[in-house]
Image: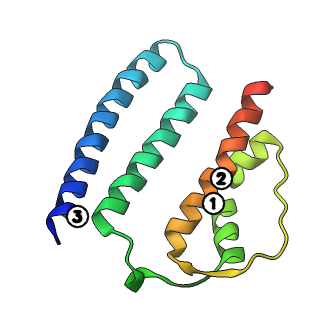
């Protein structure tokens, strides 16, 4: 690992530590006045932080990439979010998706975030 990669990993770890501390404070305040939207956003932020840590530790190199069917990625993401989608009464449709070079888990995480974002905004309007 070269110096810039080490510096990046240290930066991400420090940033994630500080973000987790901030989320703990927010969670304490949210527990005093329960709001399911706040809890949902906290969980979403925690998921993003976890992703940052995974990315910085594992790195994304070509040796970790393989041919991934995006239909499988979307199916995995939707299975993970099944309850959330049903609660929002959302309908997710798609055409056939191509295969790409990438990491299945990372692509599924991105797909979940891409689906979760509009669901969050839809829930706020209700």
Q: Is residue 8 left or right of residue 87?
A: left
Q: Quadrant of the N terminus?
A: bottom left
Circle 2 crowding by C-alpha within 10 Å: few under 14, some 14–19, many from 20: few
Residue at the spot of label 2 = 114
Rendering quarter of residue 93: bottom right
Residue 98 at x, y = what percent? 72, 80
Residue at the spot of label 1 = 111
Q: Is residue 122 left or right of residue 15?
A: right
C-alpha separation, residue under disc 2 versus residue under disc 3: 28 Å
Residue 4 at x, y = what percent? 20, 62
Q: Residue at x 31, y 43 (%)?
A: 16
Tag 1 or tag 3, which sits nearer the N-term? 3
Q: Residue at x 72, y 34 (%)?
A: 121
Residue 8 at x, y = what percent? 25, 56
Circle 3 crowding by C-alpha within 10 Å: few under 14, some 14–19, many from 20: few
Report the residue that reaches farthest toward the top.
33
Q: Residue at x 74, y 32 (%)?
A: 123
The reply to whether discs 2 and 3 touch (Cβ–Cβ < 8 Å) is no
The reply to whether discs 1 and 2 touch (Cβ–Cβ < 8 Å) is yes
Residue 59 vertical position relative to residue 36 in the rendered view, above or below: below
Q: Is residue 44 left or right of residue 28?
A: right
- Tag on residue 5? 3
The reply to whether discs 3 and 1 touch (Cβ–Cβ < 8 Å) is no
């Amino acid at each position: 690992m070269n110096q810039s990669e080490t510096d990046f990993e240290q930066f991400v770890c420090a940033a994630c530590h500080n973000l987790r501390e901030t989320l703990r404070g927010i969670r304490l305040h949210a527990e005093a006045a329960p709001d399911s939207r706040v809890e949902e956003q906290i969980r979403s932020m925690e998921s993003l932080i976890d992703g940052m840590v995974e990315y910085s530790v594992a790195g994304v190199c070509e040796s970790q990439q393989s041919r991934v069917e995006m239909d499988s990625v979307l199916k995995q993401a939707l299975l993970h979010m099944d309850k959330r989608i049903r609660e929002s009464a959302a309908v997710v449709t798609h055409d056939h998706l191509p295969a790409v070079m990438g990491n299945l888990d990372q692509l599924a995480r991105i797909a979940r975030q891409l689906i979760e974002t509009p669901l969050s905004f839809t829930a706020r309007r209700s």
